[in-house]
Amino acid sequence: MFKMKEKKHKNKSHEPKELKSKKKAHIINSSSSSNSDSEQWVEKESSIVQKETREDWMAMTGLLKTYSKQDIKPPRDVKKKNGIDSYNPSTSSRELNPYWKDGGSGLPQTPESFRKARPFLKPSEEDDYYTRSSRGHKSDYHHSKQYENRSPSKAEQTLYQNRGSSKWKKNESLNQTERKSQEQKTNVEKHSEPTVSHSKCKDTVESKYLTDDKMNKLAAKIVKAEIMGNVKLANELKEKLETAREYRKQNPDAGQEEDNEGIMLISTNKKGNAMPLTQLKRGVAKNGDGKRKAETHVSGERAKYFGNDDKYNLAQMFQQEKYGNNYDDEAELAKIASKSKNPNDDLADIFMDHISKNRDDAKECQNERQKSINEHIRIERSLEGCEYCIDSKNMVKHMMISCGNKVYLALPSKQSLVKDHCLITTLQHSLCVTSLDEDVWEEILNYRKALTHFFNSQNKDVVFYETASRLHKYPHMIINCVPLPRDVGDTAPIYFKKGLLECEAEWSMNKKVVDLKGKSIRKGIPKGLPYFWVDFGMDPGFAHVIEDQQLFPKTFAEEIIAGILDLDHRAWKNPQREYGDVQRKKVLEFINGWKPFDPVKK
C-alpha cells in the first residue's frame, strides 16, 4: 500500500501547487475528524504576483531622446498657414501700402460718391477718342450733381477735382470736341442710310471675302459673345461668317489676288543667277506606268521621239539651261544610277527610260516654289543678323568713315590688324564682288584709288583682299584694306603667291594661282564660285578658286600679313571686340588724315 501511494504521489507531482495544497488539507482533515460526517475545504491564501520591472540603469530615460523631428520642426504648410493667419498689414514693417499705417483700412480716403462702382460700358467699334471723352465728362458731371444734392457744402470741391483732372485744356478745346462728336454722330446716321456708291460697293465685295485667319478670329469672337451672353452680337457674327463661307464657295479664286500680292519669290541657281519664280503649272495625263500619252508616229512615219518634244521651243530651252535652278546634272545622274535595277543596262538605256517617263510639271513647280521659300527664309535670317547692312539693327554706324551712293568706308568694330585698317563694303546686302553691278564696282575702284593715295602720302603701301566662301549662307561682301610699310609692301606679292601655291590639297581641278594682270577679279573668276583675291594698291594681284572650303582658312590673308609683320596670334585669331572710347578714338584719328582724300567730298 505504501508503494502504491508513492506511485500515486509521483504521478501527481506535475499538478499545480494550489490543487496539491487542497488535497493535503483534505487528507489532514479526514484523518483528524474521522468521526464527522461532512468534509471541510480550506484554501490557501493566494500571494500577489508582482510584475517584473527593469532596473534603473536599463531604462536611462534621462539620457536618450524620446521625441521626433516633427515635434521640434512643424511642417511647412502649417508654418506658412500660421504665418498667413498671424500677418497683420497695419503693424508689419514690410507692408508697402501707405494706407495701412495709423490704423488705416488699406484704401485711400475718398468721398462716398467716388467709391460707388460705375457700370462698365463696352466701347463699340465706331467709338473714337472724342466720343469717349465726351461720355466721360457727362458721366462725371452727372455724379457731381447727385453728390451736390446730398451735401451742398462739398459739391464744388468734388466737381473741381473731378473735372479739373480730366479737362485740363481750355474751354475752346472742349467746344471743339463736342462739335466733332456731334459731327461724327451725324456722319454715322448718314452712313447708316442706304447709299449706292462705287467705293461702298467695292468695300462690300472686299468684306465678303475673308481669309482663313480672319474666319478663325471671327469664330473666336462668336464663342466669346456666347460666353458673355450677348446673343445679338453672336447672331450678327454668325451671319457674317455664313456669308463669307458662301462667298468663298461661289468664288473659289477670290483670294488668289491677295495671296499673290504678298512676297515675290526669286529663284537663284548654283551660278548665282536670280530670276522671279514662275506660276505653278498643271500636270498632264499619265498612263499606268507613268509614261505620256503621245503619238510618236503619223501615217507610219516617226513625228517625234518623246512626248514633250514640242512642249518647249529653242528660246525656252536656252532659258532653262542658263537660268533654271531645278536641274542639277550630277544630282540627277546619281539619282538615276541609284534607281537602276538591271545591271546589264547601258547608261544610254537608263537615261532613255527616265526621259520617256512623264515628269509632273505641277510637282516640279511646287518643289521649286518650296526651295524658293526656304531660300527666302535663309536670306531673311542672314539679313536680320548682318553687321554691315545699313538697315540692320546690329550695324555699328559710328564706325562709318565715308558713305557714297552704293558703297561706304568703315573701320572694323573689333581689334584692327594694324593701325588704319579699314573696310570697303556695300550699303545693300551683296554676296561677293563677282555678283556686283557695274556702277557699284566703279564706286569701289574710286575708294581704292583714294585709299592708295592716302597711304602713299604716309609712305605706306596698301593691300586689298577679299575671301568669298560659304556663299550658301549669304555673307556680306567685305574688302579689307591693310596698310603696310614700304619695304614690306614690296615683298608682299611673293608671300601671297607662295601661300596660294601651298594652300588646300596638292592636287586640284582648277589652277591654284590666277594672275590678274590685264583683268580684274570680275573677269578672272567665274560667277558663283568661291574664291580669294588680293591686289597690291592699284596694281593687279592674284586670285584663287576655293575648291575645299573646309581646308581653306577664313583668316588666310591675316595669317600671311601677321607672319610678314611678326604680329602676335591674338591680332588675327579671334580678335577682341572694342567698345566706347577705344572705337571713338580710332575713328577720330583716321578721319583727321582722311578728309583731304575723301572721294565723296571732292
Image: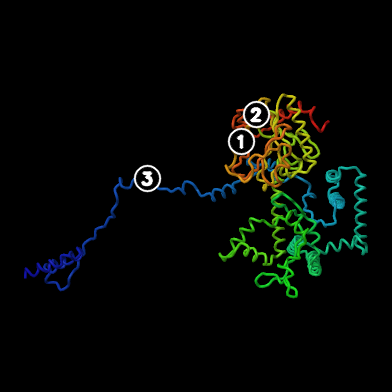
User: What distance separates the C-alpha of mark 3 from that of mark 1?
Assistant: 85 Å
Picture layout, residue 62 above or below residue 44: above
- Say what secondary structure mark 1 lies in: helix
Q: Nearer the viewer, residue 84 or 500?
A: 500
Give 41 or 425, whichever is nearer the viewer: 425
Q: Position of residue 439 (x, y in %)?
A: 80, 41
Between the residue at mark 2 and the residue at mark 1, the CA separation in whole angstroms equals 13 Å
In front: label 3 or label 1: 1
Residue 355 location, quadrant: bottom right
Residue 386 visible in the shown view: yes
Tell me where residue 301 appears, x and y as whole percent: 73, 72
Q: What residue type is labelled 3?
A: Leu
Specify the label residue 64 is tagged with. Answer: 3
Q: How crowded is mark 1: few (under 14 residues within 10 Å), some or many (20 or more)?
A: some
Type of residue at label 1?
Gly
Q: Which of marks 2 and 1 is nearer the N terminus?
A: 2
Q: Residue 491 at x, y = what percent?
A: 65, 28
Q: Earlier in the sequence, mark 3 or mark 1?
A: 3
Query: Which residue does the image show at 24% across and 60% down from the upper left?
Result: 46
Residue drawn at x 9%, y 69% as measured from the top left: 5
